[in-house]
Image (tube, grey):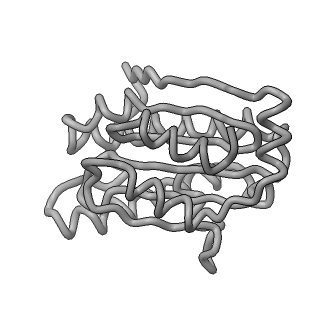
Amino acid sequence: MLEVKKKLMVMALLLAAASSLFGCGKDADEAGSDEGLTIKVTDESTEDKADSDKAEAQTVSMYDLSKEVIEAADGLPEMTTVNSEAADADRLFSYISDVEYSKIDSFFLSYSTEGKADEIAVVKLKDISDMNEVMDSFRSHLKDRTNIYKSYGADQVKRVEDAKLYSKGDYAVLLICDNKKKIISVIDKAIGE
């Protein structure tokens, strides 16, 4: 319960910052309930032995990967990017997942600063056995985001519902954006196909 409250507080702070800049939004407490919520997330897992071995053997700079992804993605709004190199990385990570941060090797998160739904997250796990927990936390995050956008950005709800989640080796990926195919190509190339 404490983790949920912590996540909601971080979301509320981010939304409050976006709202103050763009004059829209409600606090996370006013976001609504899960009643009638439908999220049709594309969720696929590509965890075969060869992919897992390649991913483990390669070290990926999340900073470099985030730059490549943002450059490759067409039509993104202005994005803020945070990663595991930040001094408060555990707090920043809690925005997208309630998984214990000690299970995370590295991550990056890019999110819209314009009140749009766009988010791109890549998370490398220390242990692939934690993948289901991370993917479940991403699904929970998407549910939270949908409820928030129902309260002030109905045009963004469909974009969240069309999110893509997938895993490759010990990496988990969350995409709320257009041009998913191009972004997936960049990510897969970086982490090893």
Residue 12, given in percent of the width and then of the height, sits at: 39, 59
Check the image and name the residue furthest to the left: 23
In the image, taking residue 68 as reference, residue 4 lies left or right, namely: right
In the image, taking residue 160 as reference, residue 95 lies left or right, namely: right
Residue 102, quarter of picture = bottom right
Residue 136, given in percent of the width and then of the height, sits at: 64, 34
Viewer-closest of 12 and 132:
132
Residue 24, quarter of picture = bottom left
Which residue is depicted at the point 85% across and 29% down?
49
Q: Is residue 162 visible?
A: yes
Residue 78, given in percent of the width and then of the height, sits at: 27, 62
Residue 117, quarter of picture = top left
Viewer-closest of 32 and 163:
163
Q: Is residue 83 above or below residue 53?
A: below
Which residue is depicted at the point 29% across and 41% down?
149
Q: Is residue 141 above or below residue 115?
A: above
